[in-house]
Image (spheres, grey):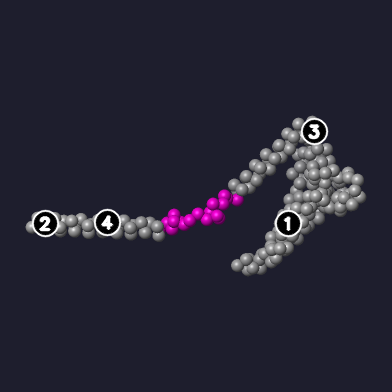
Amino acid sequence: MNVIHEARSKKEVCQRLTFSSYLTSRSRSLSDFASPRAKEPKTEASMTPPSHKIGTMRLANFSISFFMNILILIGFKVIPSWKIVFFPLVVLPLFFLGAAIGLITSMIAIVAVDISRIIIRIMGLMMFVTPIIYSDKVNSALVQAINKWNPITYLVCSARDIIIYGRLYHAGGYAICALLAFVLFMLSWRLFYVSEDRIIERMI
């Protein structure tokens, strides 16, 4: 009788353990159903920091490089002009030009990836035809002609000269190029707004 009683008690214990484990598993599944995001794997989009943090990081990087350049100028005994306070306004047309090129390139990249890559390569080569790493007073007549008709020359050199000399590189040329950059930005913005639905359809 004792053996039968022990067997029954062991069977009851096993049944209770099985039932408790079943309840535990059901409660876990219900909690997972209630909060499905807990089991979602971390994707690249979820690991990407918010836009305001990205903007803060870029602003911090720009500020560090900007003040380092100021320290280098002071180290070479080049005192920046007080007109450096106008630097954000002088560099604003460069923002318009860069944003316009970015909008146009992004639209072309949806239709033809190869053409967008060619545009990116050409923009990289523009540094060598702009007096950034060399002086604008060169002996080559060809380089002088390229610099004269290159709109980036007036925008970049004016941003540099407003810091060092407190003046624009060429006031008339800068005004024309700044106006063209703003017009190009408005046109590209309008074109992007009009073709936004078609671009989304091509992406889908």
Q: Nearer the viewer, mark 3 or mark 2?
A: 2
Camera-side residue: 90 or 46? 46
Whether the magenta-drawn stretch holds residue 47 is answered as: yes
Q: CA distance from mark 3 to mark 2?
A: 101 Å
Magenta-colored span: 34-51
Mark 4 — residue?
A: 20
* Left/right of residue 17 with respect to residue 125 in the rendered view: left
Q: CA distance from mark 2 to mark 4?
A: 26 Å
Chain-order first, disc 3 or disc 2: 2
Q: Nearer the viewer, mark 2 or mark 4?
A: 2
Labelled disc at residue 78: 3
Chain-order first, disc 1 or disc 4: 4
- Residue 192: where, in percent of width, then height? 70, 62
Q: CA distance from mark 4 to mark 3?
A: 80 Å
Mark 1 — residue?
A: 120
* Point 8% across, 57% down: residue: 1
